[in-house]
Image (cartoon, helix red, strand yellow):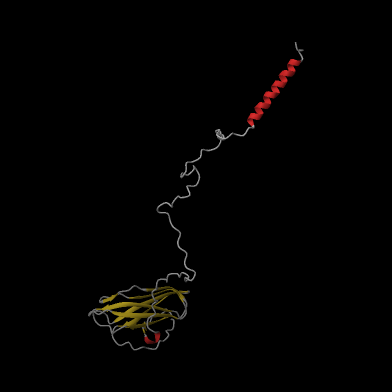
Amino acid sequence: MQPNYLVPTLRLAAGAALLSMVLAGCGKPPQPGEPTAPAPDAAPAAPAGEASPGGPGPANDVTAPGAAEPAPSPPPDAPPPTDPSPAAQPAAYEGPALDTMLAATPSAKLSVPVDLRYRFDAEPLTNQPVTLHLAAVSRVAGSNLHVSVKQTQGLQVASGPLEVQKATVAGVYRQQLSVTRSAAGPDKLRILVTMEMPEGMAFGYYSVPLTGGNAPQKLESVKQR
């Protein structure tokens, strides 16, 4: 019969041997042919030829139909692109030279410091439209220069008045209009010229004959009254 103090010692030795066997089994590498347990968080491998969820597609994927292709690069010796030419702008109306135009006859009551010149493209004939060129030459600075042909029975004028917001000294302001006179029409045009001055509104009437030639006349300054 063994003494009682040997029993705990034997149990302790048996437990230590069992623990050593368990630890040795956990550290043992897998043997060939034994299945390997997958990692707890590892995602399943995708089959060959399929894209994994959330990842890029297979290496042999083709571009989707309709996708834009990059533009080819220009050759190194190609000229630089040029901007399109701007649209042609209509030329400003210049009219005939002042020394080839006639001086309109001012009325006796004239207060506007403006000289008026005119010229017809052809001899004004009855019932035949003719182009009339007008040129108002301001001798002082002013504002709201207004040149209009007085409407009279037997006379047709196919144009509106000439209006200039700011008139400068020696400024030339031109207009062309179509005039047609009937057999019962007047033998001259009456043209009203107005302009605002520092002291008030100035105005005056000018006469342009509808008969006679187009010989140029010397421009004479009209004194302000």
Quadrant location of the N terminus in the rendered image:
top right
Residue 188: x %, y % from top left: 30, 82
Q: How many marks?
A: 0
The image quadrant that residue 116 belongs to is bottom left
Judge by depth and name the residue closer to the eye, 140 or 75: 75
Q: Is residue 201 above or below residue 104?
A: above
Residue 129 located left or right of residue 98? left
Q: Is residue 82 above or below residue 211?
A: above
Quadrant location of the C terminus in the rendered image:
bottom left
Q: Is residue 63 above or below residue 81?
A: above
What residue is rendered at 47% in x and 68% in y? 75
Judge by depth and name the residue closer to the eye, 148 or 37: 37
Residue 189 located left or right of residue 31? left
The image quadrant that residue 137 belongs to is bottom left
Judge by depth and name the residue closer to the eye, 32 or 147: 32
Residue 183: x %, y % from top left: 22, 80
Residue 6: x %, y % from top left: 76, 16
Residue at the extreme left of the image, as rendered = 183
The image quadrant that residue 185 belongs to is bottom left
Q: Is residue 33 above or below residue 63?
A: above
Residue 98: x %, y % from top left: 40, 84
